[in-house]
Image (spheres, rainbow, N blue to C red):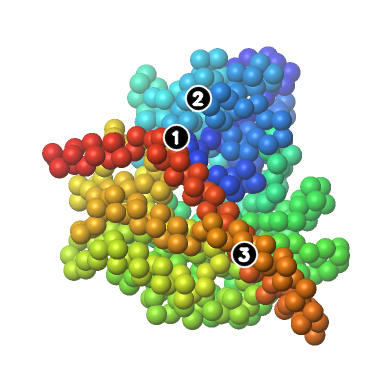
Amino acid sequence: MFDSSKKRKRFRLIIPAYPAFNIYSGIANRTTALGPVCIATVVNKMEGWDAEVVDENNLRRYGPKGASFGADHEFLQNLRPVDVVGFYGGLTSTMLRLYEIARFYKDKGVVTIAGGQHFVEDNIADALSSSIDYVVIGEGEETIRELLGAIEANLEINKVKGIAYLNNGRVILTSKREHLTDFEKIPLPDFSLVRYAKIQIYPVGRIRGCGMDCEFCTVKGKPRYAPPERLLEQISFLLETKDARNFFIVDDLFGQQRDETIRFCNMLRDYQKNVGTRLDLAVQIRLDKAKDHELLSAMRQAGINMVAIGFESPIKEELIAMNKHLMPEDMLAMTRIFHKFGFLVHGMFIFGYPLQEGVNFKMSAKERAKRFKSFIKKAKIDTVQILLPTPLSGTELRRRLAAQNRLYALSDLSWEYYDGNFPLFEPDAPMTAEEMQDSIRNIMGKFYQFKYMFMVGLHIFSFPAMVFFLHNIRLGWRKWYRLWRNDLARFGGWLIMKRWRSQFKKDTFLERLQKAKARLKVK
């Protein structure tokens, strides 16, 4: 228990480092997670409390680096001792690092709290036996305020809704807390609380929840909306205080509340005109929103330049298994519409999705990879991300694979491999786990190549050709910029993949995989 007699108390919220270099590392040191900032902001508004966020993946401003990776928490605790430490458990692959840091603080007598999408079902008991005092279940803004107040005043913890803790070795779950619906109850996220980070892309959002009910996803429930004015206020405040120009709207699906989304876009368009600046925004959106030309036009006028789209797969049977409501034959035409409106398209795919029992469909890894590469080329997708299916805790996918006895044991392939780059279950015949992993590297290797370094240079020399677009400078710039930007991204992707391969060769994953496969056969 912390010293409640102190005049002011300090709360530190830690975003654990990725266990190894992966495809997210490049973007991670240019941004941060929105959720931890929201929680820290609430605590910082509490009387007698100071709060901060330490993102171990973004320590670019004098951040104290650990011996191997992450932050030096011994240094931090000596410099600014904290009374309570919180942990962001939104990424399953970072859980081992989270528990490692929790042990350090627990040994120092610090109260430890964790929350995030990972903490569901059996993972709660695992966390409470791994140096975590309290697990926050669901959204945390209201819970953290009540929990810290109860701890500080020595009140009954079981009165706090939405938490789990141990009592005489038994897991206690308090009553469920309802989802937040009135977002005006919480303050706007304060990014000045993020220590050491150099943030170039600011995450903002106004919609929580997603009604798509995808089998592999942990985000469920009816969407809840904050007013468009609140999102505009977030963006304008960051522009005015941080000179922020680049934003990622983290809503799972942009445009879920169509009319209000269009109203937001129009408000943002007018705001930029009034202040005389131009912003650059990216969003996640459904491919079938290509049919809504009014929405797309409003988005472009608002400065939304890139759309991240979950294509998932160009194979019909896999799309059905994922509960997707699009077929491959419609995807190319819809992608062309996004390009026609001037959007850069980031395509997100899942390779080797396991089909439901009873589905009579078989395809080799080689043929699947061929289909993926052909589709990506035809669609002219600007950047791609190919991941393997990840059976995250709490998803229907994990429950189905467990029931089918296809999951590899956590004792062999632990949480650190749950980042989409490693096979974690026995795939559909005739594929093998090794073929699945080789396939995503093959597809990405075809897309991201060293040769694009030379193309970047050629585009620089071709810039004078803009003279042919004097009648429409904006169109000429857009065409030139897209080619230059994509080739730069493809060369950058090659560098990331090269480093990932180097790290992979030093890892023991293949040995662990063989043990996991052997254990599964014994079952």
* Residue 358 location (% of width, % of height): 17, 65
What residue sits 29% from the left and 54% below the top?
Answer: 435
* Residue 250 location (% of width, % of height): 59, 55
Three-letter residue code for mark 3: Met
Q: Secondary structure at mark 3?
A: helix
Quadrant in which residue 230 is drawn: bottom right
Look at the image and tell me whether residue 177 can be seen: no
- Which residue is under mark 1? 95
Distance, label 1 to label 3, CA atoms, is 40 Å
Q: Is residue 304 left or right of residue 171?
A: right
Mark 1, residues whose alpha carbon is within 10 Å: few (<14), some, or many (≥20)?
many
Q: Is residue 228 left or right of residue 494?
A: right
- Which residue is under mark 2? 102
Three-letter residue code for mark 2: Ala
Three-letter residue code for mark 1: Met
Quadrant occupied by the C terminus: top left
Distance, label 2 to label 3, CA atoms, is 47 Å
* Vertical position of residue 4 compared to residue 214: above or below: above
The answer to which of 515 and 147 lies nearer the viewer is 515
Q: Select label 1 or label 3 by which is in front.
A: 3
What residue sits 76% from the left and 76% below the top?
Answer: 466
The answer to which of 25 and 334 lies nearer the viewer is 25
Distance, label 2 to label 1, CA atoms, is 10 Å
- Which residue is under mark 3? 455
Work out whether mark 2 precedes mark 1 in sequence or the reverse, and give the earlier one.
1
Q: Secondary structure at mark 2?
A: helix
* Residue 134 location (% of width, % of height): 48, 29
